[in-house]
Amino acid sequence: MSKAISAQGLVKSFGDVKALNGIDLEVEQGSVVGLLGPNGSGKTTIVRILTTLLRADSGTASVGGFDVQSQPDDVRSVIGLTGQYAAVDQYLTGRENLELFGRLFHLSKRDAATRADELLERFSLSDAADRGIKGYSGGMRRRLDLAASLIGRPSVLFLDEPTTGLDPRSRQGMWDVIQSLVAEGTTVLLTTQYLEEADQLASSIVVLDHGNVIAKGTSDELKNQVGGDRIELVVSNAADSLRAATVLAPFSSGQATVDEDAKRILVPVAGGSNAIVDAIRALDEASIAITDIALRRPTLDDVFLSLTGRITEEDQAPKAPKSGRRSRRGGN
Amino acid sequence: MSTKTRPLLGWFIADTLAVARRHILKITRVPETLFFALIQPVMFVLLFAFVFGGAIKGFPGGAQDYRAYLISGIFAQTVMFAVAGITVGITEDASKGIMDRFRSLPMRQSAVLAGHTLASLAQNTLVIIALSITGLAVGWRIRGSATDAILAYVLLATFAYAVTWLGAWIGLHMPNPEVAGTAGLAWIFPLTFASNVFTPVATMPGWLQPIALWNPVSCLALACRQLFGNPNPFVGNSFPERHAMALSFGWAAVLLAIFVPLAVRSFKTRNAGGQA
């Protein structure tokens, strides 16, 4: 059996801008691969090429064993696509939308209606099924959009930033739904700007930058490269900085970084939330007053910092003058 | 559950009808769309018949005949304005991502545009009916034969259908619905006013007359006047005036021959959403 998705040497330019610089990608049947990268890294371009919406300048790609350029109709019959915007008609009801897409997927009228019912039920939209989409919340629209992409029971599902713009609760809801699809054996290629999301959903992650693949691996492999979780601590008195680092050394999984001027200490830890409880207790016993303490998870910025030596371009911050380290935005 | 098998033409028709149904449902959900599409030509009739009609002293037969003359002109103008609605509709679909969804489905791609233009035709048919009723109310009558009258309505519908393909093509090249709203209308005003819609061509300056005579809107309005048997003063013996109906069908055929393939090609190769 061939790979669910296979691409070799994909190149795409938009005018002078080179969006893809020769991308190779292999996705096994039933696996979930996350494309991780900042805006402009080429994630969406890859998805658009693989879903037949865009032609690559060069390179080849196949989805479900069909070539995206020479067999677009066959590709379209095995894929589902959920883009960055809820691609549904806001003047139609949820049910009408699903039936429309079912008909266009060439289901019979009765099958389209049955399938619409199933999906509305599954995505907890039955109560809102006969209301116009205009009255749906952002989370409901995204769920309907995902439902629409599942009309034809796709074997390969493309999710382009499926939770961008959603509140945390709706995001968790989307994650649950995606995880249940994966459990049923659907192959998923998803793009995201959030390491946390890739971590939750994807079995392997491909990191993109300026149209190049700069890293591949499982989420653990990437995190180890970045250095995993760390405790970020701010002490009340600058004089306590070094002593705090010493007190926390037993819980640390690596070299602590101390910035005396900012009274800030960064300690890599392995124990997650247990580590922070131990740390607070130890600091208290040593009578070190703290103004702030937090457990930081690695973010896309951290991955980028460790892979490229710079943070994602959009939020490029100036170098911290004294310490020589780059300042970073808070975790998300 | 399995997908059905059918010959390609069968799928094209089925897909077209499914898409058309979507747009017709949309009209029923937002009745304002239809209301304003109806109110605009009716306003034009009332404005020109009663506000300007009195001032048009030189018109043979007076205000009564001017109104009968005017209605066919407004028919032609209304058919042109049909472009604006579909231009905005197509751009809106493209900006919302629903077009990408259509393009990622195993449907006949050209059915997306065929269905949209078919729904527009249904809407424009309603508008033409409403306009006919308004015309009857202000004194317009069908004086020609029933066959000619039917031919006039077929011509109007064909022309309306042809211009919506032009509108679809424009819509596929507009960056957003706001721009599409103005772009769809900008070129229609000069086209409908530099024509015989409101005033006979013979009253225009000499340099403008050939342009106004060959203007597709003039051909259409003149053909309707001839077929409906309406007053047609100052009409000359030039080629476009002698062959108004044939030319109008010709214009419609040219529009379809150019813009159906162009619009379908733009749709298939478009790169909505751009990069990133």
Image (cartoon, rainbow, N blue to C red):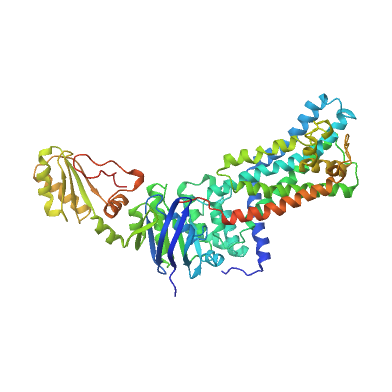
| Camera-nearest residue between A5 and B41 | A5
Total marks shown come to: 0
Q: Residue at x 75, y 52 (%)?
A: B253
Image quarter of the N terminus of chain A: bottom left
- Is any atom of residue A284 visible in this view? no
Residue A115 sits in which quadrant?
bottom right
Q: Is residue A225 above or below residue B33?
A: below
Q: Position of residue B83 (x, y in %)?
A: 68, 44
Q: Position of residue A331 (x, y in %)?
A: 29, 47
- Is any atom of residue A282 visible in this view? yes
Q: Position of residue B112 (x, y in %)?
A: 62, 55
Q: Residue at x 37, y 48 (%)?
A: A168
- Asked whether, in this view, residue B65 is left or right of residue B214, the answer is right
Q: Is residue A228 above or below residue B70?
A: below
Q: Quick one: which residue is furthest to the front in this view?
A: B207
Q: Position of residue A306 (x, y in %)?
A: 26, 53
| Camera-nearest residue between A30 and B55 | B55
| Camera-nearest residue between A271 and B179 | B179
Q: Is residue B16 above or below residue B202?
A: below
Q: Residue at x 85, y 31 (%)?
A: B66
